Image: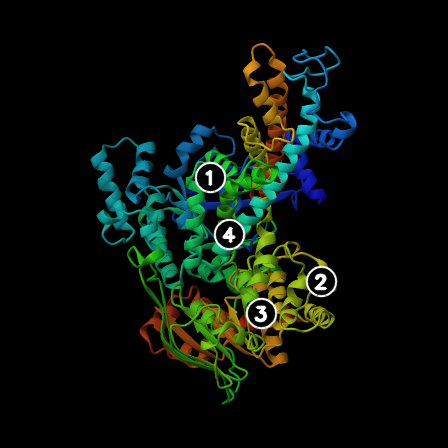
């Protein structure tokens, strides 16, 4: 573990990313302390510029506090990003592991199914799903997971394909071990590193998709989110720039930080890079 | 008077900080003359390959660098010349052939264009001339149909053909020095014999100085004029081949040479009449599958096993010998049910196990176990050694405490420290890992042990330790063993009987002693005559039996 941290630490920007993510998480966790009111509440004069009328980052056309929206929106973004990614990784591992391990017709069928999902442009597919399921936080999570699991499935399948013919797996067969146990205890732990890396990057994508959906008005109407704020402010971009800009910057910084961390995890977990040092 | 080509004086190569030793090689001195073959021998990590790379200027700089000494090639110090000059020298004056011809050749370029490249960069010739010269070269290295080979890509050639093409490229510009880094290690014995002969022949034609790096004393005996033995980056002994091989001075050289298994078979045990395993008319074909819904052409079929029949008697070691692609590993995997047979019968104690369902087979797993070839791939890197060994009994329904107790016993039986129990596989060396693999296979108390090339990935000195261990265990646990190997020397030392396989068929089976004395099948005769250094060991074996008993004590 210390070894891992030493390798991770070598990548300065990854450490920076980790600090930023930590701050975003802190912000989300203390949202109710910082702004102990509903971010949808009309808090004062509409379209106040930043620093006036008691608004740190200004207010929007209905007088909602932009700063409060960002702080509460962080909760939404992180939660959706994390949950959607976990669901997607789970489905991806399930499909990939079965396809890679059993091969043959099972692989054929599972991979053709995966391809069906991969051929539909993911954002349009997500819009379609949310539109069918009615916008709510659940449908957003489902939509994001459904469009992002195929990548994981492909990755896991590849890993399983190469690992299942290793001698240590064959040795387990000769000991009479069951397939489930071989998959879970022998093979899966050996492909965790790439899964962690792809998973961390998927959180960033999930946050982007969620923002996109909320921007188009397909987010949960009762939950504050960054995409919703941008969508609400876009018509006044020229007269009240702050309404769109600050949530946009929040998305940019968070996604960038997550990508940096993913990059750092890749460096730290990738054994080939490890040997080079 | 032969001209001196290469003179290395007091060469030190420094490793980066944090490596296991400060210098990769220390105080190396060597000389190479025209038309001479100098063999550099050593086990893995002895620094022999780095020495060769230093001559070519191919050290992975800046981490690894020459820190002292000089490499004089025709009165020019290679360690000091400019990068441009080095590039001129490489290929035209000094060239190199590598161990693995598949990775040394560019897979997306045809052989012809790869040879052409050498001429284009080094000499001024017209396209037609270059083409003609390339065909001549391929013809020189005895490749059939040179014109066709010119157009072929590396994957279309066999291993031996690829190595011939590599040699053709290395000799294209008539270099004065040829460095061969384990050029035959990845090849079969019969191919190896041909390639060694080719290198010898080409050397005569071009009067090249050959620096030959190898770990195999048999090869040394066949081709070397002089030998240099390296250990941990230090030259421990050097001299004319006869002197070093037959009269080694340094204890390390003695130990290495005595570890080379002798070709004269050991005394066979009296074989019991009781059959523990019968293999009858087993066939196995690969390929022939189609895609989803049965579209697409069926893939090419390979008959890996054709009508294989053999018996294993109680307490004996049966060797299965053959070159790559002979089906020996497929046979092992069919017997242990890692693969399904197409037809035929594999019988243990009257039960035909090759037709059992997986569930039913589980009960038979503790009768028959396997030791794998690659000690680095055969242990799960994420599981502790103790758990790896205890896994088998636990899977078979033995309670955890009992299994762990057995694992601890086995760790000491295979000669490992008790502390090994809580360590991960990467903390162990190749030989120790193979011991762990053996302990795992013994944890189920099997009656039959299949060893699939258990020593071919190990250095000679460790090889003999593992063979001794297997022998002891076989006696102690009253095992019957199927021993798969490509190395006839090993087979001679381990097997009571042996079966020779070629193209999926058993071409000859009998007592090891009889097969070595009077091989019947032409393929067996070829195999035996291709063993490197066979004349040397038979003449020197008398002297060495003495050192062998000494080194064991």
Residues tagged 3 and 4 counted as in contact (Cβ below 8 A): no
Q: Secondary structure at mark 3?
A: loop
Q: Which residue is mark 1?
A: B56
At 62% from the left and 65% from the top, the residue drawn is: B435
Is residue B99 visible in the rendered structure shown here?
A: no
Q: Are marks 2 and 1 on the same chain?
A: yes
Q: Position of residue B381 (x, y in %)?
A: 61, 55
Q: Which residue is mark 3?
A: A175
Residues tagged 3 and 1 counted as in contact (Cβ below 8 A): no
Structural distance between the alpha carbons of marks 2 and 3: 19 Å
Structural distance between the alpha carbons of marks 4 and 1: 49 Å
Sort mark 4 into few (<14), some (14-19) or many (20+) by Cα contacts within 10 Å: many
Q: Label 1: chain?
A: B
From this viewpoint, which residue is outermost toward the right? A33
Structural distance between the alpha carbons of marks 3 and 1: 48 Å
Q: Position of residue B409 (x, y in %)?
A: 71, 71
Sort mark 1 into few (<14), some (14-19) or many (20+) by Cα contacts within 10 Å: many
Q: Which residue is mark 4?
A: A95
Which callout, 2 or 1, points to the residue nearer the camera? 2
Q: Are marks 3 and 4 on the same chain?
A: yes
Q: Secondary structure at mark 4?
A: helix
Q: Which residue is mark 2?
A: B421
Which callout, 2 or 4, points to the residue nearer the camera? 4
Which callout, 3 or 1, points to the residue nearer the camera? 3
Quick check: A252 above or below A197? above
Q: Label 3: chain?
A: A
């Amino acid at each position: 573990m210390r070894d891992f941290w030493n390798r991770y630490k070598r990548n300065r920007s990854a450490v920076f990313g980790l600090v930023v993510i930590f701050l975003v998480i802190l912000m989300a966790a203390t949202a109710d302390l910082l702004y102990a009111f509903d971010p949808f509440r009309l808090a004062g004069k509409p379209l106040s510029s930043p620093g006036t009328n008691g608004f740190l980052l200004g207010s929007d056309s209905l007088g909602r506090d932009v700063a409060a929206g960002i702080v509460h929106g962080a909760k939404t973004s992180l939660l959706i990003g994390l949950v959607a990614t976990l669901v997607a990784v789970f489905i991806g591992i399930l499909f990939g592991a079965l396809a890679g391990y059993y091969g043959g017709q099972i692989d054929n069928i599972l991979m053709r199914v995966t391809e069906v999902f991969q051929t539909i442009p993911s954002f349009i597919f997500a819009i379609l799903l949310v539109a069918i399921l009615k916008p709510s936080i659940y449908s957003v999570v489902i939509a994001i997971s459904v469009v992002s699991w195929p990548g994981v499935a492909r990755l896991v399948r590849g890993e399983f394909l190469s690992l299942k013919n290793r001698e240590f797996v064959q040795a387990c067969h000769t000991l009479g071990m069951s397939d489930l146990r071989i998959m879970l205890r022998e093979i899966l732990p050996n492909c965790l590193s790439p899964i962690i890396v792809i998973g961390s990057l998927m959180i960033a994508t999930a946050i982007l998709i969620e923002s996109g959906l909320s921007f188009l008005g397909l987010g949960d109407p009762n939950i504050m989110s960054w995409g919703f704020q941008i969508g609400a402010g876009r018509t006044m971009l020229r007269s009240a720039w702050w309404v769109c800009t600050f949530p946009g910057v929040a998305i940019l910084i968070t996604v960038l930080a997550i990508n940096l961390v993913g990059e750092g995890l890749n460096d730290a977990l990738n054994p080939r890079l490890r040997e080079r040092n | 008077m032969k001209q001196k080509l290469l003179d290395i004086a007091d060469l030190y190569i420094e490793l980066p900080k944090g490596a296991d030793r400060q210098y990769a090689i220390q105080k190396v001195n060597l000389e190479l003359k025209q038309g001479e073959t100098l063999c550099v021998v050593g086990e893995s990590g002895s620094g022999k390959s780095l020495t060769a790379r230093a001559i070519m200027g191919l050290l992975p700089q800046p981490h690894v660098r020459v820190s002292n000494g000089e490499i004089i090639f025709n009165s020019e110090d290679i360690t000091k010349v400019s990068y441009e000059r080095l590039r001129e020298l490489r290929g035209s004056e000094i060239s190199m052939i590598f161990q693995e011809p598949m990775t040394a050749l560019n897979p997306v370029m045809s052989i012809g264009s790869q040879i052409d490249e050498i001429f284009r960069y080094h000499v001024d010739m017209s396209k037609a001339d270059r083409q003609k010269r390339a065909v001549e070269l391929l013809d020189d290295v005895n490749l059939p149909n040179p014109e066709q080979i010119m157009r072929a890509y590396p994957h279309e050639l066999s291993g031996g053909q690829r190595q011939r093409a590599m040699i053709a490229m290395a000799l294209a510009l008539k270099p004065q020095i040829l460095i061969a880094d384990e050029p035959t290690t990845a090849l079969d014995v019969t191919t190896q014999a041909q390639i060694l002969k080719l290198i010898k022949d080409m050397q005569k034609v071009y009067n090249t100085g050959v620096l030959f790096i190898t770990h195999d004393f048999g090869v040394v005996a066949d081709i070397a004029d002089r030998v240099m033995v390296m250990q941990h980056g230090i030259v421990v002994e050097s001299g004319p081949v006869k002197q070093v091989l037959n009269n080694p001075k340094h204890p390390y050289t003695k130990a290495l040479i005595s570890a080379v298994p002798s070709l004269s078979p050991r005394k066979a045990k009296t074989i019991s009449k009781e059959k523990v395993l019968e293999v009858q008319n087993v066939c196995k074909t690969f390929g022939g599958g189609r895609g989803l819904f049965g579209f697409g052409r069926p893939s090419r079929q390979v008959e890996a096993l054709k009508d294989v029949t053999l018996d294993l008697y109680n307490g004996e070691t049966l060797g299965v010998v053959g070159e790559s692609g002979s089906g020996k590993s497929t046979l092992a995997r069919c017997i242990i049910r890692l693969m399904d047979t197409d037809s035929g019968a594999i019988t243990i104690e009257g039960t035909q196990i090759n037709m059992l369902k997986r569930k039913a087979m589980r009960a038979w797993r503790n009768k028959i176990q396997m030791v794998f070839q690659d000690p680095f791939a055969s242990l799960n890197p994420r599981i502790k050694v103790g758990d790896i060994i205890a896994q088998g009994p636990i899977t078979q329904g033995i309670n955890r405490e009992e299994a762990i107790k057995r694992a601890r016993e086995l760790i000491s039986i295979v000669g490992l420290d008790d502390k090994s129990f809580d360590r991960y596989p990467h903390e162990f060396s190749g030989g120790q890992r193979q011991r762990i693999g053996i302990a795992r296979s013994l944890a189920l108390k099997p009656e039959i042990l299949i060893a699939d090339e258990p020593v071919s990935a190990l250095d000679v000195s460790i090889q003999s330790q593992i063979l001794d261990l297997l022998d002891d265990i076989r006696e102690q646990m009253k095992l019957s063993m199927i021993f798969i190997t490509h190395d006839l020397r090993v087979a001679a030392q381990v097997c009571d009987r042996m079966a020779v396989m070629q193209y999926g068929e058993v071409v000859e089976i009998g007592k090891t002693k009889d097969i070595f004395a009077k091989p019947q099948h032409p393929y067996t005769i070829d195999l035996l005559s291709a063993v490197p250094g066979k004349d040397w060991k038979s003449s020197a074996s008398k002297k060495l039996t003495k050192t062998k008993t000494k080194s064991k004590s």
